[in-house]
Image (cartoon, coloured by chain):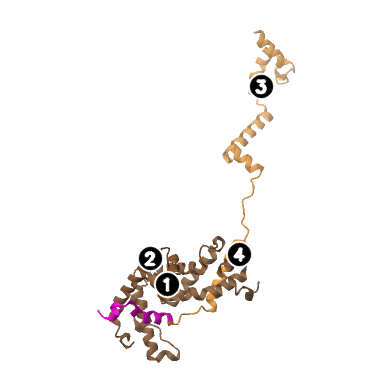
Chain colours: A orange, B brown
Amino acid sequence: MTEFDRDGDALEPFFKAVRAAEVPAPGPDMLARVLAAAEAELDARAAPVRRPGRPGFFATFLRAIGGWPAMGGLAAATFAGVMIGVVQPASLVDQVSPWLMQLGLASEAEDAFSLDPDAGLALTFAAIEG
Amino acid sequence: MALDDLADVGDEALLVAYANGDRAAARVLTLRLTPRVLAQAYRMLGDRAEAEDVAQEAMLRLWKIAPDWRQGEAQVTTWLYRVVANLATDRLRKGRRMSGTDIAELPERTDAAATAPEQMQEDARAAALQAALADLPDRQREAVVLRHIEGLGNPEIAEIMDTNVRAVESLIARGKRALTAMLAPKREELGYDDD
């Protein structure tokens, strides 16, 4: 083995050559890109973050009842109730009237749904007396 | 704040100012740190284009970490050394091994010194060392470069490499032994015997 092999300092001329070697300086383009990246980061941080607002009444209600499927069912039930009230199906009146007249809760079949205001009370007494 | 006023401000204070939206601080840091980062990347990679990529990536990481920078834990330059070393090591791992670099392939110097035999010998030595460094294990190369080319002290190298001083000394010693073995056969052609 020679001196070169044994002595770590023998590497020093090589290190010195690398240290002395010309290193590239950043050009204006590179500096501009680095600075642009810095400013882009600032801009990105400064941009207002769109936070989700508090849910409104309707959204809260919708979530409370179980979402749009539940809303669909609710709408259908409401529509059905309104339609029954508006149309008053004749078959319903025909079937209920005799029973109401028998109980004395209605005087005439065609007036079956014009209930006596005291009819509920009379029905209650009738039930109590057996 | 004017750039002149910021010239004497430390790196860490500038980074905090930048994180708080000071664009002038970003300009000072760019002008101050980019040349150092590029030089380190170039010395590790030996290729300008790759060194520029690494330097830009390192600076971008600095901008991104600025809001979360923990003051007093590390110097900005130490942090950058670590980032550049890691990025350069990744590049070398990904296949661009400089061991294949032929001295004859090195770019020709265009200045007046290009023809001076001494300068050619210096260039040849630098190229030979770069090629040998590329064949070292990653940690040994990093330690040797930081110690003998970047000129850092062992405690700082230990901090950069996230290890202790004794481990750094061991890495450097083993790295230099390997370099010596690799360069010994070339000592004559590199003019070592003339020194």
Magenta part of the chain: A1-19
Question: Dots 4 and 1: beta carbons under 8 Å?
Answer: no
Which quadrant would residue B103 be assigned to in this image?
A: bottom left
Mark 4: amino acid: Asp
Residue at position x 45%, y 74% in the image: B40
Q: Can residue A78 be seen from the camera position used here?
A: yes
- Do the residues at pointers 4 and 3 share their chain? yes
Q: Is residue A15 magenta?
A: yes
Q: Name the secondary structure under disc 1.
A: helix
Mark 1: amino acid: Leu
Report crowding for label 1: few under 14, some 14 to 19, many 20 or more residues within 10 A (C-alpha): many
Give percent across and percent down for residue B88: 42, 70
CA gap, disc 3 and disc 1: 100 Å
> Where does the C terminus of chain B fall, quadrant-wise?
bottom left
Residue receiving disc 2 = B166
> Foreground residue, A8 or B35?
A8
Mark 3: amino acid: Val
In the image, which is nearer the foreground, mark 4 or mark 3? 4
Which quadrant would residue B168 be assigned to in this image?
A: bottom left
Residue receiving disc 4 = A43
Q: Is residue A79 magenta?
A: no
Would you say A129 lies left or right of B132 here?
right
- Do the residues at pointers 3 and 2 share their chain? no
Residue receiving disc 1 = B146
Question: Dots 1 and 2: beta carbons under 8 Å?
Answer: no
Residue at position x 38%, y 87% in the image: B120
Question: Of callouts 1 and 2, which one flags the residue occurring earlier in the amino acid sequence?
Answer: 1
Give percent across and percent down for residue B114: 41, 89
Residue receiving disc 3 = A93
